[in-house]
Image (spheres, rainbow, N blue to C red):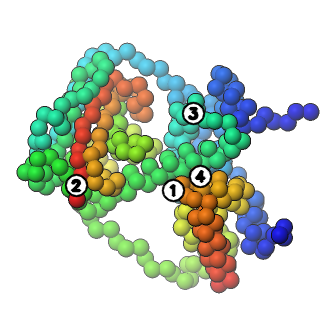
Amino acid sequence: MSEIDPLTGLLEDHYGSAAPEVLPETGASILRRARRRRLPVAAAALLALAGIGAGLAMQGPGESALTPRGVGDVDVRLEFVVEGDALRRGGDVRLDEAVNFRVTTAQPGFLCLTELADDGIAVFPPPGGEWEVTAGSSFPALDGRVQAWRTDAGEGERTYRVLLDLEYPDCRSPAGQAEVQLRWVP
Amino acid sequence: MTGPADDDTLHAAWLAGDDAAFDSLVERHGRAVLGFLRTLVGGQAEDVWSESWLRVLRARHRYEPSGHYRAWLFTIARRCAQDHQRGARRWFRLRAAAEFEVPPPPPPNPERHLRLVQQKGQVSDALATLSAQQQAIVRLTYAEGLSSAVIGEILGLSDQQVRNKLTYARRLLRERLQEE
């Protein structure tokens, strides 16, 4: 049956007559962005994810969850806190709770926080965004408001990784990294 | 006597160090990828498009020549859009819960709907009433000419699921267009 029905014809005409899209950038500019050179790490930076804000309970699940697993030249430390009463339960996070992050750096740079579930998704900054920090403490924030994170990948143990790049927002040349694990429970 | 290089040849040239080959691939497929992403993430398509090409860069050595280069790009773009939506949804949900109530969307306004139909055309308007996934399937079928099996690979669905969803989307489109 080779006859084209009216709806198929309408749709093919619709897409065929659409005005051509203007590309956001060229292949050359994509390559330029991807080839940012890696600068030598000048000094150590400190990353710390820690408790913030009123009404938050500091989570103390023990050294196993808080043990820094940073690699490379830069001293990295990673901590986190959870809303609610996670402290009493020994560190698990309920799916209706949320995690707050704070990052403290000894140097300015760019941070990228990732939840290593499935093939890994960016937690912060959102796609297309940048998380530029000055030396000292900073928080994931949107429109000037501090944000908390809640997984929607269901229960289970997830690894969170933060990268510090001293120059570039995509964190492809990290000067240091740290990981921490959270267990999400019903 | 020779036409433009095929996608697999361009990709191989790119891997061999020919940057112009990558530029040609972006020029050749970039608009289709952007249009596809527009059905999935709307106004965020440009941002996700850029991120998608960076992922293509990272995954370039894993591509296996198959003659379905655009489908491979669409698959990467779809995953990128999915990550984008998951991330945005989680942050938004928390922000809404913590700080303000999000008002429900206003009910459909028939007069406004009619104006939009007149301005944008019946087909555009009917397509806009479909879900993002339905729009993607319709677009990949009629704009890209891809088979249901290939679309299934791109969207993470079975061949049969794509066929069923396309049938349902077409039925909805017919109904919407007949309502006009």
Q: Is residue B103 above or below residue A105?
A: below
Q: Is residue B104 above or below residue B100?
A: below
Q: Is residue B119 visible?
A: no
- Secondary structure at badge 2 equals strand
Q: Give amino acid for label 4.
A: Glu
Whole-percent x, y for residue B148 in the image: 66, 59
Which numbered marker is on residue A185?
2
Do labels 3 and 1 touch, CB within 8 Å? no
Q: Chain of mark 4?
A: B
Image depth: mark 4 or mark 1 in front: 4
Which numbered marker is on residue B62?
3
> Do badges 2 and 3 share one subunit?
no
Gap between marks 3 and 4, in whole Å?
Answer: 16 Å
Task: Please tell me which residue lies in front, B131 or A165.
Answer: B131
Gap between marks 2 and 1, in whole Å?
Answer: 30 Å
Dot 2 crowding, Cα within 10 Å, few <14, some 14–19, many 20+: some
Earlier along the polypeptide chain: callout 3 or callout 4?
A: 3
- Image quarter hosting the C terminus of chain A: bottom left
Q: Give amino acid for label 1.
A: Val
Which numbered marker is on residue B153?
4
Which numbered marker is on residue B41?
1
Whole-percent x, y for residue A147 in the image: 27, 50
Gap between marks 3 and 1, in whole Å?
Answer: 26 Å
